[in-house]
Amino acid sequence: MDFKDSTPDALATDLDPARQADGATRNMDALIIKGGRKLAGRVEISGAKNAALPLMAATLLAPGVHTLRNVPLLSDTRTMAKVLEILGARVEFRGHTCKIDTSTITSLEAPYDLVRTMRASIYVLGPLLARFGAARVSLPGGCAWGPRPVNLHLEGLGAMNAALDIEHGYIVGKDVKLKGTTFRFEVVSVGATAQLMMAATLAEGTTVLENVAFEPDITELGADLVQCGARIEGLGSRRLVIHGVRELKPLDTSIIPDRIEAATFLGAAAITGGSITIERCDSGHVAAVVHKLEEAGCDVLPGNREVTITGPARLGAVDVVTEPYPGFPTDMQAQMMALCSVADGRSTITDTIYQDRFTHVPELARLGCDIRLDGNVAVVTGVPHLQGAQVMATDIRASAALVLAALAAEGETRISRIYHLDRGYEALDQKLQQLGADVERIRE
Ligand code: UD1
């Protein structure tokens, strides 16, 4: 892998996940944030992590040189590049353009040390089985906020005629010839939808997938595969019909803007009572978040591929329930909790996607947030002011919630272990500085 020229300073530190996994080095940067500044100005949103990762894996479906533009420079996209390289692909970054040559695949094994650092590595399973008829991919294991099963990936591929075994912690498929089937997801799953959609493009016959996810990242993946020759009907709906084809052409696409990054910046303006314009943002993709922010008293003005938001002097309380797209995203639950913590009144936040996704609660409490957990419901009683403190990032979105709370808190907050943040936000500290926030990255 070759990240050339434009690696931002924020990523200049050693984020190589393989070395992190070894424990040889670990990016132990921290953020120091002095709160109380209202954000102002314009910020540009990077490409979507959750669109880039399945698309990078999808390059395995077709031999040749694939071109992905607007790829966010994140430790997660580096990890996916590493996974592809271990399989024998040649990956080259020039700025945000990533060229992946998958005509040189020599291995069909995604090893534990990489998969455990990033669960999305499992996306290579379907494409490997579809193109090569075999794969050996590590099970991802646990996650900071509880179990995240992959049974739907395995059941769906099984229904498509892939006899998969679990051997020594690895998912193993041999002599697989994928065949079309009808498969209904018992719960809406982003990951499993992407997995089966990719696999079905090269399966023999027609696959019908019911109760699928249609997050913009998924719809984009499908649309890009169609550009490569896949035959997919129903994109943007809960039912996909995929007619298998014999081969696909290489991808040539540009990654859509990251709706969660955009929504996080909306939150940053809202919590500081600031006014900012978010460029390269599809307002339709953040509609559920905008709706809640308006309910909390923000003024939101969608423009042409941009959104302007002005926060009120004090936010109002809101009730939020996470749901599959187009509902309120689980990936904004933690950030919304930070906002509710300083709102006038009592809010409730219910996560229906991941019932245990609350590792940010004790850290937010250190900043003075008043949050009571009752199962998958957080009852948040807004306080007039938060106070800076030392806190620890625990996962990508939990870290973002701490950043938002710190921007509103009186005094200095030190957020350690921000390698979590670097997995999902490109140069967040620099973008916040540009908006007038007092943010500094230090090496601990
Ligand atoms: C989920 C989010 C996605 C977010 C990501 C990371 C949804 C629908 N998905 O995607 O927006 O970016 O987390 O935060 O909001 N499940 C199973 N078996 C499986 C796969 C999933 O039971 O094989 C369950 C999960 O436990 C969860 C639900 O399905 O309750 C949705 O999971 P899924 O969408 O697959 O998770 P991610 O792809 O990680």
Image: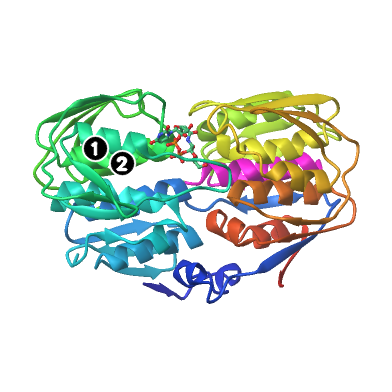
**Element on which disc 1 rests:** helix
Marks 2 and 1 in Cβ contact (< 8 Å):
yes
**Element on which disc 2 rests:** helix
Residue 264 lies in the magenta-colored region: yes
Where on the picture, by quarter, is residue 365?
A: top right
Residue 443 lies in the magenta-colored region: no
Q: Name the residue under label 2.
A: 195
Residue 437 in picture, x, y percent from top left:
77, 57
Please name the amino acid that badge 1 sits on: Leu
Report if the beta carbon of the residue with label 1 is closer than 8 angstroms to ligand 1: no
Q: Mark 2 against mark 1, which lies toward the viewer? A: 1
Tag on residue 157? 1
Task: Give the residues in magenta.
Answer: 257-280
Q: Distance between the residues labelled 2 and 1?
A: 9 Å
Point 55% across, 50% down: residue:
45
Whether residue 193 is visible here, answered yes or no, is: no
Report whether 13 appears left or right of 77. right
Tag on residue 33? none
Picture layout, residue 362 above or below residue 64: above
Picture layout, residue 147 above or below residue 16: above
Point 12% across, 35% down: residue:
179
Residue 213 in picture, x, y percent from top left:
39, 30
79 or 440, nearer to the observer: 79
Residue 148 in picture, x, y percent from top left:
47, 40
Where on the picture, by quarter, is residue 1?
A: bottom left
Whether residue 324 is visible here, answered yes or no, is: yes
Please name the amino acid that badge 2 sits on: Gln
Q: Residues within 10 Å of mark 2 (few under 14, many from 20)?
A: many
347 or 173, nearer to the observer: 173
Picture layout, residue 160 above or below residue 362: above
